[in-house]
């Protein structure tokens, strides 16, 4: 019995390494909702429009589009964990400095720092899961990894509000960085490299653009579906807080609503992951996209807590497809897990975020409900990609 426990929690075990990767995901995504939480405050304090507010996410998208493929390529060439160590540090510093920005330009800089840190972590984090766990445990391991990140996003708005109410805006970066630095030091000491228990060891890669082209040619339907999902999720998290703030809600209530959305996401990942095991990943993906669109349309048409309920259900459903798309993509290109992850978890997120400035412009011209209508329509756009040959031939 003692020897079994030792193997389970030994720094050399896949369970220990998965736990470290998941802890890093939690702390990296613990700051994911800082921008949506403080968006109403920034609009009021800096006097910016919804289009300018949406450009924060567009700028994030550009950063992820540029850096995620490069970082995914680098992570496939090395088992050194420095990307998953430094990523959360930059993420924390950037996110906690956003509400301190004295000008719109400084706010963009801090958003960029936050985005760069997140772009550093995710390719090696997702790809690392595929390397440290056996192949038959990939889907469930990616679900656990995703749940850890979602738990961070869930706590993020409440954490942001709690920091403001306890230490204030100026001390937020100092207080928040301490646990992130400690985790980074512990990771460096106990996991100096990622092993390859999945059987798909790191192999010599082609050039960056050759690798990107060859991987994208295989998994492009998953990228398109992921891009639509991320645009939907970010659209709700950016513009629904603006709607409820315009109805008189304060920052605490906005944070609570964002918390409920991500709490629902955490719970739905557990349920939908089980459904995917029974019904198949591809069939479940199609079903969830349709259900999420219906919920978002219902939320846009409703008001008060009914609207909140439907937006929580719709956002939770669409977000719960993340481990499904990640698993399908990695199984399609097992020797380029980092690049695959950078495309379906990073490049897609970047493309989804780039739509936020145009969506904000629509909100400025026609009202925030017009933007939410477009967001509700988005999940239905995935159906043509579900019919493509690469997706139909992918492992279920």
Image (cartoon, grey):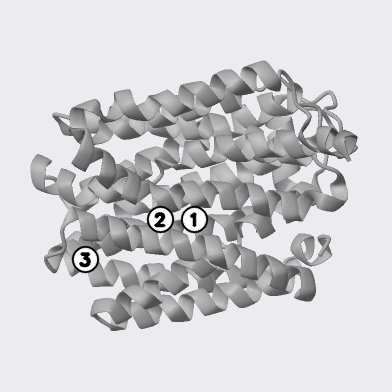
Residue 394: percent from left, percent from top: 81, 60
Quick one: label 1 or label 3, which is nearer the N terminus? Answer: 1
Residue 224: percent from left, percent from top: 59, 57
Figure quadrant of residue 207: top right
Residue 234 numbered tag: 2
Q: Nearer the viewer, mark 1 or mark 3?
A: 3
Q: Could you tell me which secondary element the residue under label 3 belongs to?
A: helix
Residue 168 numbered tag: none
Residue visible at 57% across and 63% down in the picture: 320
Quick one: label 3 or label 2, which is nearer the N terminus? Answer: 2
Alpha-carbon distance for marks 2 and 1? 6 Å
Q: Could you tell me which secondary element the residue under label 1 belongs to?
A: helix
Residue visible at 38% across and 80% down in the picture: 297
Viewer-side residue, 315 vs 349: 315
Q: Say whether residue 7 is visible.
A: yes
Name the residue tied to disc 1.
230
Alpha-carbon distance for marks 1 and 3? 20 Å
Are circles 3 and 2 on residues that touch, CB within 8 Å? no
Q: Residues within 10 Å of mark 3 (few under 14, many from 20)?
A: some
Figure quadrant of residue 239: bottom left
Residue 292: percent from left, percent from top: 50, 74
Q: Determine whether, in the image, residue 230 is placed left or right of residue 15.
A: left
Number of numbered callouts drawn: 3
Are circles 2 and 1 on residues that touch, CB within 8 Å? yes
Residue visible at 57% across and 47% down in the picture: 148
Name the residue tied to disc 3.
243
């Amino acid at each position: 019995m003692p020897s079994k426990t030792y193997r389970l929690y030994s720094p050399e075990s896949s369970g220990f390494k998965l736990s470290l990767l998941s802890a890093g995901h939690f702390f990296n995504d613990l700051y994911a909702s800082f921008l949506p939480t403080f968006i109403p405050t920034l609009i009021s304090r800096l006097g910016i429009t919804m289009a300018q507010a949406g450009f924060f996410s567009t700028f994030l998208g550009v950063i992820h589009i540029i850096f995620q493929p490069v970082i995914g390529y680098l992570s496939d060439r090395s088992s050194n964990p420095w990307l998953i160590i430094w990523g959360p540090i930059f993420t924390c510093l950037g996110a906690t400095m956003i509400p301190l920005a004295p000008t719109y330009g400084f706010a963009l800089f801090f958003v960029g720092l936050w985005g760069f840190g997140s772009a550093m972590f995710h390719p090696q984090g997702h790809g690392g899961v595929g390397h440290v766990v056996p192949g038959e445990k990939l889907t469930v391991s990616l679900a656990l990894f995703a749940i850890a990140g979602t738990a961070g996003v869930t706590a993020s708005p409440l954490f942001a509000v709690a920091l403001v109410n306890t230490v204030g805006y100026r001390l937020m970066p100092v207080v928040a960085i301490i646990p992130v630095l400690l985790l980074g030091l512990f990771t460096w000491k106990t996991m100096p490299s990622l092993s390859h228990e999945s059987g798909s060891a790191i192999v010599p890669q082609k050039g960056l653009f050759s690798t990107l082209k060859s991987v994208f040619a295989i998994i492009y339907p998953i990228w398109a579906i992921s891009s639509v999902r991320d645009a939907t999720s970010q659209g709700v998290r950016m513009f629904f807080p603006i709607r409820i703030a315009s109805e008189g809600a304060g920052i605490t209530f906005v944070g609570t609503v964002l918390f409920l959305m991500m709490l629902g996401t955490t719970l739905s990942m557990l349920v939908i992951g089980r459904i995917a095991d029974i019904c198949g990943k591809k069939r479940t993906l199609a079903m969830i996209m349709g259900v999420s669109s219906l919920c978002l349309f219902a939320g846009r048409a409703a008001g008060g807590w009914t609207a909140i309920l439907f937006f929580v259900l719709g956002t939770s459903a669409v977000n719960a497809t993340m481990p499904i798309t990640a698993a399908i993509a990695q199984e399609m290109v097992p020797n380029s897990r980092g690049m695959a992850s950078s495309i379906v978890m990073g490049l897609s997120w970047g493309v989804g975020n780039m739509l936020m400035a145009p969506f904000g412009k629509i909100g400025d011209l026609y009202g925030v409900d017009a933007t939410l209508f477009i967001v509700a329509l988005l999940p239905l756009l995935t159906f043509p990609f579900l019919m493509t040959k690469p997706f139909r031939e992918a492992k279920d």
